[in-house]
Image (spheres, rainbow, N blue to C red):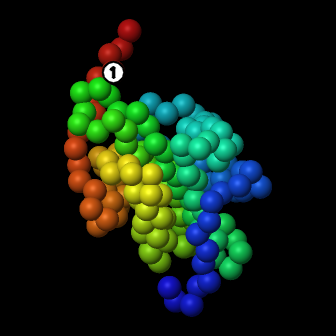
Amino acid sequence: MNEMKFLIRNATAADLPILMQFEQGIVNAERPFDDTLKDGQIHYYDLAEKIESPTCCVKVIEVNTVVVASGFAEIRAAKDYYKHNQYGHLGFMYVLPEYRGKGLNQLLLDALIQWCKEREVNEIRLEVYPDNLGAIKAYKKVGFEPQLLQMRLHQEK
């Protein structure tokens, strides 16, 4: 890792200020892919709740004691028509721009997938915008494959 000293650990309530900044980084990165997002600050997640939840694992990566990346895995109930009863949903994947391309996202994914495996959750899913080719490439590298493309139609009143 180019002599970076890194630590992957569970997030704590003390991390909330930086995690809230990461959430806005995700929102800003996704705005070009989704013109339905409201202007201004929006929140996708209740991060404090996720940190405390027994069915969710929020991980961060520290480099030289500075939090530079985040992600979560959450165990969710599957629809009754699926073969599996539950699945791990991955989200909140963020790496500070200056630390991208150093393999940190891969480390986060590995840690979150391992957390799911330890709970005997073998089906793992995530959502990504179809035009976010960089993210799709990174997820495919880990073994994810596209499954369903959600489509929308907006009609003027």
| Residue sitting farthest toward the right | 14
Quarter of the figure with the C terminus: top left
* As drawn, 119 above or below 49: below
Q: Position of residue 21 (x, y in %)?
A: 66, 52
- State whether residue 17 appears in this view: no
Instruction: Tell me which residue sits at (48%, 50%) in the image.
Output: 73
Q: Secondary structure at mark 1?
A: loop
Residue on which disc 1 sits: 154
Instruction: Tell me which residue sits at (71%, 75%) in the image.
Output: 65
Instruction: Tell me which residue sits at (64%, 71%) in the image.
Output: 62
Side of 136 relative to 61 (left or right): left
Instruction: Tell me which residue sits at (46%, 42%) in the image.
Output: 75
- State whether residue 125 appears in this view: yes
* As drawn, 95 above or below 147: below
Q: Position of residue 80 (x, y in %)?
A: 29, 26
Three-letter code for the amino acid on which mark 1 is drawn: His
Which is more toward the observer, 3 or 79? 79
Image quadrant of residue 63? bottom right
* As drawn, 142 above or below 57: below
Which is more toward the observer, 57 or 149? 57
Q: Position of residue 140 (x, y in %)?
A: 27, 61
Image quadrant of residue 48? top right
| Residue sitting farthest toward the bottom | 3
Q: Position of residue 7 (x, y in %)?
A: 61, 74
Which is more toward the observer, 48 or 38? 48
